[in-house]
Image: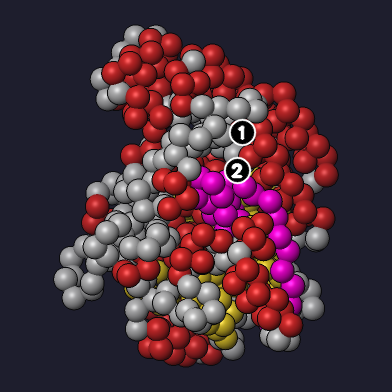
Amino acid sequence: MKSFEVNFDGLVGPTHNYGGLSFGNVASQSNSQQASNPKEAALQGLEKMKALMDMGFVQGVLAPQERPDVGALRSLGFSGSDAQVIAQAAKQAMPLLVASCSASSMWVANAATVSPSADTADGRVHFTAANLNCKFHRSIEHPTTSRVLGAMFADQQHFAHHAALPAVAQFGDEGAANHTRFCRDYGEAGVEFFVFGRSAFDSRYPAPQKYPARQTLEASQAVARLHGLSEEGVVFAQQNPDVIDQGVFHNDVIAVGNGELLFHHQDAFLNTDQMLAELHGKLAARGGNFQSICVPRDQVAVEDAVRSYLFNSQLLSRPDGSMLLIVPEECRANPRVWQYLQGLTAAGGPIREVKVFDLKQSMQNGGGPACLRLRVALNETELAAVNPGVIMTPALYDTLTGWVNRHYRDALRESDLADPQLLIECRTALDELTQILKLGAVYPFQIN
């Protein structure tokens, strides 16, 4: 039976703004308070989805969240009508209003961790929504994320959904941004690779000193248990705390994997040799031939990797067995990174081609190509069981482009977030979107 790795890209929401909310994310903080362009951001994301579809990859779309999150503001003591809640928050606690308007759910690499059926004890695809409890503006996402994923992958014969882990620091979980999977074929048993920044209970693991380590070992272990993964099919590795302190807030900012290949920076991990040997041994036991490409620090410094998002790329397998690397325009703009990539593709290794996409609106807020997609490995039967409304087609692309052009603003500043009309615009757009994507009622305003 044929199997696929499907990329479900996050659709940028109507309230996309530069709030500078993510401490530890260099781009997010450095572009704080600039005017954003939600329409351009959504269209840039859709263009990438269409391009991958046109290249023959199965491509899906994941809906954004309702923003501002009036329910979250009410839970913090603001009251009255929706307009009054927004007005009170704007007057008394503007940072809370900005957080409640964040469109960060666009980065669906943080939506959940996904284990394919070939790896799990019960033979179903498992999803665990990420609690994202390190940042308030992201911690409020997982209830809607769970409902959206449940509407997309509804067939209980093939899909299993788990609630987010307890929303405490000891179980900080940032989803697939710290998880990848190695396999000979997407439909065969593979090795799931969990990367953590710190341990909550074991002081032997060093922690970063400047920026928070968002993923804990204990959270990664809990997800592996929930998904029914075997000890032979998992590897846990610690991210280098020094690179976290240089702005590498998730592993997908310093490494990316696909198939039998790990593409990573020299300074990405602690105990790198031991980790690579474990990955090689466990994948070999499952019939695979693990390979790694290490980018030396003397060719690409960590600072260059962070600024260009070289590793926050999509590594895609083509029918001939070679791989394609999808990178943001910022990689071409960085002379050292671009020189390295030119040499990489000329070397005749597994990565044969690099394609560049303009994702400036997302990049300025701290998210590149890999942030924008959630990978789900599916066999033919499972793919047929996915809600067809979320699978990209030329007709859906045209429909969503028209939807964005009708509903999105082309400029948004912090002061605009206090406009109660923005909430009405967002709800009107999302109500129509759920019909386009055939999701049913998934948003609080549709349920309550």
- Separation of residues labelled 1 and 2 (CA atoms): 7 Å
Q: What residue range appears in magenta?
A: 350-378
Please give the label number shown on residue 361.
2
Q: Are marks 1 and 2 in contact (CB under 8 Å)?
A: yes
Which part of the image, by quadrant, shows the C terminus? Answer: top left
- Expressed as whole percent of the image width and height from the top left, the position of residue 377 reads 61, 63
Q: Is residue 279 above or below residue 430?
A: below
- The answer, for residue 58, to whether it is visible in the render is no
- Expressed as whole percent of the image width and height from the top left, the position of residue 246 reads 37, 63
Q: Is residue 150 above or below residue 191?
A: above
User: Which quadrant would residue 438 be assigned to in this image?
Assistant: top right
What's the amino acid at mark 2? Gln
Question: Was residue 363 drawn as part of the magenta stretch in this picture?
Answer: yes
User: Which quadrant would residue 71 be assigned to in this image?
Assistant: top left
Which part of the image, by quadrant, shows the N terminus? Answer: bottom right
Q: Residue at x 32, y 70 (%)?
A: 242
Q: Residue at x 54, y 32 (%)?
A: 35
Please give the label number shown on residue 228.
none
Quick one: 9 or 337, which is closer to the camera?
337
Q: Residue at x 79, y 78 (%)?
A: 320
* Within-10-Å neighbours for mark 1: few <14, some 14–19, many 20+: many
Quick one: 267 or 231, which is closer to the camera?
267
Residue located beneath label 1 in the image: 37
